[in-house]
Image (cartoon, rainbow, N blue to C red):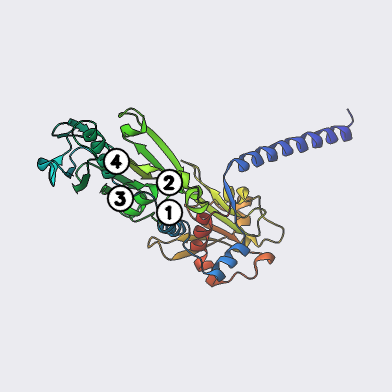
């Protein structure tokens, strides 16, 4: 084969290998979660003064829903509760204090045991009146008041302000349970909640030992107003708000695809990987003046680490390992408006943007 033809074949083969290699890199990069963020987004947020959205926004909506969504607040009776029973016309049942036994029953003259587990005080009055009317009284008048709440507790755990055990003194729903625990912890709470059922009440038609776990989308409930997700919370239920586990690094400035990029479990991110995830540098980038912004141990201030990205990419200097929440900023002609004040506050603005969900 002539030498010129061999060169052409070699070049074509090299080109195909290069395209295949770039395709593999692109495929890997696409697997990493990315939230597009531009310098313009950051500037808008700085002007708006929005720095701590997400959990606080959901808490505001939680309070709003508590104010406008009024449900039945009747308490459901349970074992150990103390009630005061009055049946007009029966002397022994005048302000009579009774305790619901382990099965949720009380004992009354003439009608013996009555099952009140899972009923409200009003429903109990109707049931007892019906039983007396069927046996010894005409048009009986029954009054029941709850004197002591001893039976019903729920647990609210996870990313809430005051996790713990709470006693029920009325019928509650999911938003009530979250409010009892002080609401969500900003910047930590996921936008979802799990309700672990300990055992559904018998009046629902389910077996007493039935168990299930419900996953509730808080954005759907609180932002979109889907009240069907405001499920009732029963005694023994555990309401769990998971903490956000996503970790990100950021690449901004004169790169092809700036934004927030997920750090996968067990993964080590270097500057070279970070720039590859962002699609590489633009022709206008001043790679030699790249800055890595890193949060200091005090959690408030940041440090600016200068680095020559061009030398890192060419292998002339050692690659740099990035930390979670590091911001790689590559200056250039498209980022002339970015000043030192913005660089100092950029990490906080980015976290607000990610949590608010520029998705």
Mark nearer the N terminus (1 vs 4): 1
Mark nearer the N terminus (3 vs 2): 3
Residue for badge 4 = 123
Mark nearer the N terminus (1 vs 2): 1
Mark nearer the N terminus (4 vs 3): 4
Badge nearest the viewer, 3 or 2 = 2
Badge nearest the viewer, 1 or 3 = 1
Badge nearest the viewer, 4 or 2 = 4
State the SS at label 2: loop
Spatial CA span between label 4 and label 3:
32 Å
State the SS at label 4: helix
Residue count near mark 2 (Cα–Cα under 10 Å), binned few <14, some 14–19, many ≥20: some
Front-most of 328 and 221?
221
Residue for badge 1 = 69
Residue count near mark 1 (Cα–Cα under 10 Å), binned few <14, some 14–19, many ≥20: few
Return the x and y of residue 18 as percentages of the image width and height. Answer: 73, 39
């Amino acid at each position: 084969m002539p030498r010129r033809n061999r060169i052409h074949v070699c070049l074509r083969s090299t080109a195909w290998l290069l395209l295949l290699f770039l395709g593999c890199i692109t495929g890997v990069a696409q697997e990493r979660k990315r939230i597009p963020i531009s310098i313009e987004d950051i500037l808008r947020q700085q002007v708006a003064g929005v720095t701590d959205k997400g959990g606080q926004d959901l808490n505001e909506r939680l309070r709003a829903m508590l104010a406008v969504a009024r449900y039945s607040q009747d308490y459901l009776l349970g074992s150990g509760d103390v009630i005061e029973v009055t049946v007009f016309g029966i002397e022994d049942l005048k302000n009579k204090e009774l305790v619901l036994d382990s099965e949720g029953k009380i004992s009354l003259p003439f009608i013996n045991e009555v099952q009140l587990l899972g009923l409200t005080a009003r429903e109990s009055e109707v049931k007892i009146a019906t039983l007396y009317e069927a046996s010894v009284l005409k048009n009986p008048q029954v009054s029941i008041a709850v004197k002591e709440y001893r039976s019903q507790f729920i647990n609210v755990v996870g990313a809430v302000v005051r996790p713990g055990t709470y006693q029920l003194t009325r019928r509650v729903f999911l938003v009530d349970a979250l409010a009892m625990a002080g609401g969500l912890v900003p910047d930590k709470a996921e936008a979802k909640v799990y309700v672990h059922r300990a055992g559904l009440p018998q009046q629902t038609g389910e077996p007493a030992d039935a168990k299930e776990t419900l996953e509730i989308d808080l954005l759907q409930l609180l932002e979109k107003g889907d009240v069907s997700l405001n499920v009732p919370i029963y005694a023994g239920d555990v309401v769990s708000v998971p903490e956000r586990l996503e970790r990100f690094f950021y690449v901004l400035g004169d790169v092809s695809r700036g934004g927030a990029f997920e750090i996968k479990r067990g993964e080590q991110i270097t500057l070279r990987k970070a720039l590859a995830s962002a699609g590489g540098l633009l022709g206008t980038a001043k790679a030699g003046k790249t800055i890595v912004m890193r949060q200091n141990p005090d959690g408030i201030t940041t440090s600016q680490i200068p680095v020559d990205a061009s030398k890192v990419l060419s292998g002339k200097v050692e690659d740099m390992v990035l930390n979670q929440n590091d911001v790689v900023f590559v200056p250039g002609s498209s980022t002339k408006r970015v000043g030192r004040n913005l660089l100092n506050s950029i990490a906080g603005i980015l976290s607000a943007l990610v949590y608010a969900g520029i998705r």
